[in-house]
Image (spheres, rainbow, N blue to C red):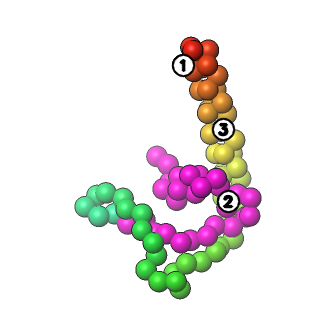
Amino acid sequence: MPVPWIRLTAQHGLPAVHAGELTIGRQLQRVRGQPLHRDTKTQASDATLPLPDICLTALKLRQVSSKATRDALKRLSDSLGR
């Protein structure tokens, strides 16, 4: 199961991978079993944190894997004439 903050970061072009840091500006809460993404409660809660090398490596591998999957699906779709 994907980690929500990685999925959220991936939706924004993985800026953390290139900068080596993660900017915290939203929070993930669970309300009645449903995940909700919200802004942090205060400006003091927003932060930019350095990512450990293992996280950078995992995010870069995920980015490469996602691109390869998208490219393969596009080729398949094109070959089927869709």
- The C terminus sits in image quarter: top right
Mark number for residue 82? 1
Q: Which mark is residue 15?
A: 2
Q: Nearer the viewer, residue 74 or 9?
A: 74
Q: What is the three-letter code of the residue carrying label 1?
A: Arg
Q: CA distance from mark 3 to mark 1?
A: 20 Å
Marks 3, 1: nearer the viewer: 1
Nearer to me, 4 or 81: 81
Residue 19 vertical position relative to residue 71 in the rendered view, above or below: below
Going by the numbered disc 2, the residue's amino acid type is: Pro
**Mark earlier in primary sequence (2, 3):** 2
Residue 7 is a magenta residue: yes
Q: Is the residue 4 above or below the residue 31 in the image?
A: above
Q: In the rendered structure, which disc, 2 or 1, sits on the residue that comes first in sequence?
A: 2
In percent of width and height, residue 8 lies at 53, 56
Q: Which residue is painted at 34% across and 63% down in the image?
A: 30
Q: Which residues are magenta?
A: 1-29
Q: Residue at x 74, y 64 (%)?
A: 19
Q: Residue at x 64, y 74 (%)?
A: 48
Dot 3 or dot 1, earlier in sequence? 3
**Mark 2, secondary structure of its residue:** helix
In the image, residue 35 lies in the stretch drawn in magenta: no
* Residues marked 2 and 3 touching at CB (< 8 Å): no
Q: Residues within 10 Å of mark 1 (few under 14, many from 20)?
A: few
Task: Name which residue lies at 59% across and 26% down.
Answer: 73
Residue 54 shows up from this direction: no
Q: Are marks 2 and 1 in contact (CB under 8 Å)?
A: no
**10 Å neighbourhood of mark 3: few (<14), some, or many (≥20)?**
few
Residue 70 location (% of width, % of height):
61, 33
Residue 7: which disc?
none
What is the number of the mark on residue 67? 3
